[in-house]
Image (cartoon, helix red, strand yellow):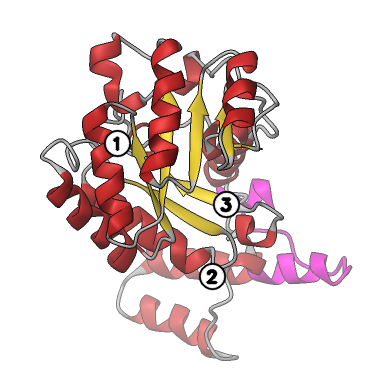
Amino acid sequence: MPVDQSPIDMLLIGDSAAMVVHGYDTTLPITLDEMIMHCRAVSRGARRPFLVGDIPFGCFEEGPTFAVRSAVRLMKEGGVDAVKIEGGAPARVETVRAVVGAGIAVVGHVGLTPQSVSVLGGFRAAGLRAEEAARVALEQAGCMALVIECVPELVAAAITRQINIPTIGIGAGAQTSGQVLVYHDLLGMIQHPHHAKVTPKFCKQYAKIGTAISEALEAYHADVTQRQFPLARYSPYALREGEDWRLVEALRSRGLDLAAAAAATGIEQGKQEAARANGSAAAPPPPSNSKAAAGN
């Protein structure tokens, strides 16, 4: 996994996978089983960074007991080092305290909390006064770190100075302890219509992977339709020496003249390509009825 070879310190396997992988409009539909699947895949490929798994919507609304059970599954089955829990309401703080009490590291999340999108009326910056109280409560509940999303830089800076755990900003300015961006956003993968039309204002795109993918697929399509792929070097499976013409004769003997002609054409084209690869000009011209010959 490329990120395992980079200096990135921490990976968040986020419920944003609902949007950038599964194609939903919000993060709400993704299930715990799906999150475990994503966490397990990442933990196999990225063994160096610290891994944090998002507990998805629906896993802590039923109370601390179910939240602890969900967190345990993410740890045991998903292979993560910590879990992330959104929100700072009193009930959520109690959930954090219960999960921490079970011996599981928790990253808190305040500011814009995507799991509350139905209450917020969309993806927008949340109220700021409530975040001031929530961040203190989450630290006291035992959070090891705090994600701060979509708040003014001065607010994020003040929170960072006032608490004793690291803060991780996303759309919250440069004064937090660290930064996080959605993988697909920073790489310019543009896999979902929401991201294609509304790339977050706070996101710098460090690559244009989506454009590169589109261009590669267009080139592949052109090569296939113009008979430029696969040429001989991408067709490594061959009959033993002398068996090719025996195949042609066997086809002719069975009255399969069209198949025999196609096989003979393929043999001659293979010789041509081999001759060109070796810098030889002695190869005979291709048969006139070969559609693929024009591209060779």
Whether 276 is drawn above or below 38: the answer is below
Residue 20 visible in this rendered orientation of the protein: no
Which residue is more in the foreground, 58 or 101? 101
What residue did someone put label 3 on? Answer: 10
Kindly identify the residue that appears in the image at 59 percent across and 29 percent down.
162
Give the amino acid at mark 1: Val
Quarter of the image with the N terminus is bottom right
- Start and end of the magenta stretch? 270-296
State the image quarter where residue 214 is shown.
Answer: top right
Kindly identify the residue that appears in the image at 17 percent across and 46 percent down.
64
**Marker disc for residue 264:** 2
Secondary structure beneath disc 3? strand
Q: Disc 3 or disc 2, which is closer to the eye?
A: 3
Mark 3, Cα crowd under 10 Å, few <14 / some 14-19 / many 20+, is some
What residue did someone put label 1 on? Answer: 93
Whether 45 is drawn above or below 184: the answer is below
**Marker disc for residue 198:** none
Q: Disc 2 or disc 1, which is closer to the eye?
A: 1
Residue 283 lies within the magenta run: yes
In space, the residues marked 2 and 1 are separated at their CA atoms by 75 Å
Kindly identify the residue that appears in the image at 70 percent across and 26 percent down.
174
- In the picture provided, is 247 more to the left or to the right than 159? left
Which residue is more in the foreground, 118 or 205? 118
Q: Mark 2 or mark 1: which comes first in sequence? A: 1
